[in-house]
Amino acid sequence: MGLLSSVISICVLFFLITSSTAKTSPSKPHALVLPLAKDASTGQYITHISRGTPSVPVKLTVDLGGRSLWVDCDQGYVSSSYKPAHCGSAQCSLADFHSCWDCFNGPKPGCNNNTCLLFPYNAVTQSSTIGELAQDVVSLQSTDGSNPGQIVSSSKALFACGSTSLLEGLANGVKGIAGLGRGKVGLPSQLASAFSIKRKFAICPGSSGVIFFGDSPYNFLPGKDISKSLTYTPLFINPVRTGGTSFEGEPSAEYFIGVKSIKINGKPVSINSTLLTIKEGNGGTKISTVDPYTKLETSIYNAFTKAFVKAFAGVPRVKAVPPFGACFNSSNLPSTRVGPPVPTIDFVLQSKTVFWRMFGVNSMVPVKEDVLCLGFVDGGVEPRTSIVTGVHQIEDNLLQFDLARSVLGFSSTLLFQQTTCSNFNFTIKA
Ligand SMILES: *[C@@H]1O[C@H](CO)[C@@H](O)[C@H](O)[C@H]1NC(C)=O
Ligand SMILES: *[C@@H]1O[C@H](CO)[C@@H](O)[C@H](O)[C@H]1NC(C)=O
Ligand SMILES: *[C@@H]1O[C@H](CO)[C@@H](O)[C@H](O)[C@H]1NC(C)=O
Ligand SMILES: *[C@@H]1O[C@H](CO)[C@@H](O)[C@H](O)[C@H]1NC(C)=O
């Protein structure tokens, strides 16, 4: 029985893979690339993917832990290649759909009979709706790791139809969310099967930035391949859904790492280690691209802030500027290549010698003239996840997620390597 169902699912998967590659461009890409822009008013990372027939670029907020791609089908979705996924189809089983429905105001994109439903999720407002599963053409640029190249298309990209109301809280002009989560309908797995590329992606967020799908190199001007200087740590699967991004009984689509301790200037901060392991879905450390600053569970936050203030005792404190709890007078601080010279923060991982080190540029936030705040916020008592690493802490860091091996490669700040995430050469090479 178990064997039979796995044979069936392998056949289904094979069908999806072969049918999608058959319709893409003849030359198989090595990797794909998407541009990232930081939206000034919300701090969200935005990308563009072309979809439909005729092909139109849509602006999407990037959610690293998002379960799937979803777009607003209520307004302005016009495409002759839009196909709803019908109940009982291979697409529905791949997406672990929730239930089937009939929609009486159609047929139109987002409203068809006998289709399966997903829950498109907005991680910014933490809300979701129901929406039909559909497929359409998506196009993006291939890359050799140094420049974008030829545009490639897949006619089988699966996504959920969201509604216009679900766009609330997203940056201006955004029409949906690009979910990079670890599941089968996450963008990385879908692109990997559609284009026969490695089940791997790398994200480099900065004042602008880049996402690579597939294998390295990841070349940044002036000619640095960042894949050569990564440190690796295991990714953990949280068996319980988190943040509305997956269904009951399905593991979380988010990316968890095993932080074992935190050190400031090399000295361990005293924290309750129970909070750092995942137990029944609670605790642990995840990486987020929708939280602007790293959130620490209250007791960790208090111990961490206290230890940082102590290590930074030579610099006068000033009144805290919310949401931050510790701010300093920076008028006498010089600047360095990696930001203001402040105590280093290490997230110690699988062993003492493997740590993610943060320097001033990632740990501190200049809030106004002469005022610099520790850029971590209180995540509250008993949050689902104890440490949520936010955008400010990963800016100008390259993070590579290898889904096949379940490993994260991270660079620490690229400023030490005299480059930034904005230094990918987006000039098209013919
Ligand atoms: C869906 O099916 C119902 C009958 O069950 C029918 O009245 C309706 O017109 C159909 N809608 C579409 C979009 O086909
Ligand atoms: C550590 O955290 C766990 C989980 O929240 C809690 O049950 C336990 O009482 C805490 N231990 C201490 C010493 O505070
Ligand atoms: C910071 O310190 C300088 C003196 O070193 C002082 O003139 C200035 O007013 C202080 N700024 C704040 C915001 O406290
Ligand atoms: C960016 O790539 C283009 C195309 O390969 C090349 O002509 C150009 O010199 C590159 N830019 C820089 C700054 O190296």
Image (cartoon, grey):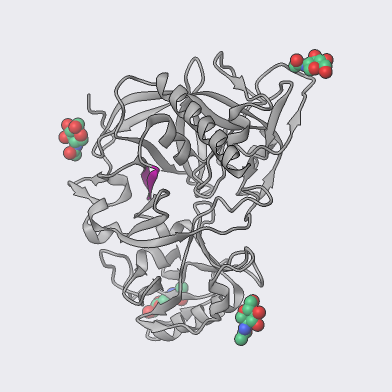
Vertically, is 10 above or below 152?
Answer: below
Vertically, is 325 above or below 89?
Answer: below
Q: Can you give x and y, in whole percent of width and height, for residue 98 in the image?
A: 70, 39
Please report the residue visible at 66 percent of the width from the left and 72 percent of the height from the top.
381
328 inside magenta stretch: no
Q: Can you give x and y, in whole percent of width and height, for residue 186 in the image?
A: 51, 41
Q: Is residue 299 left or right of residue 375?
A: right
Magenta residues: mostly which secondary structure?
Answer: strand
Quarter of the rendering containing residue 177: top right
Vertically, is 43 above or below 295?
Answer: above
205 inside magenta stretch: yes
Which image quarter holds the N terminus? Answer: top right
Q: Tell which quarter ligand 3 is in.
A: bottom left
Q: Is residue 353 left or right of residue 39?
A: left
Q: Which residues are magenta?
A: 199-211
Front in this rendered view, residue 359 or 366: 359
Residue 57 in view in this figure: no
Vertically, is 268 above or below 397?
Answer: below
Please report the residue visible at 76 percent of the width from the left and 28 percent of the height from the top.
101
Number of dots carrying numbers: 0
Q: Can you give x and y, in whole percent of width and height, for residue 83 in the image?
A: 60, 20
Q: Is residue 102 left or right of residue 86?
A: right
Please report the residue visible at 28 percent of the width from the left and 44 percent of the height from the top.
216
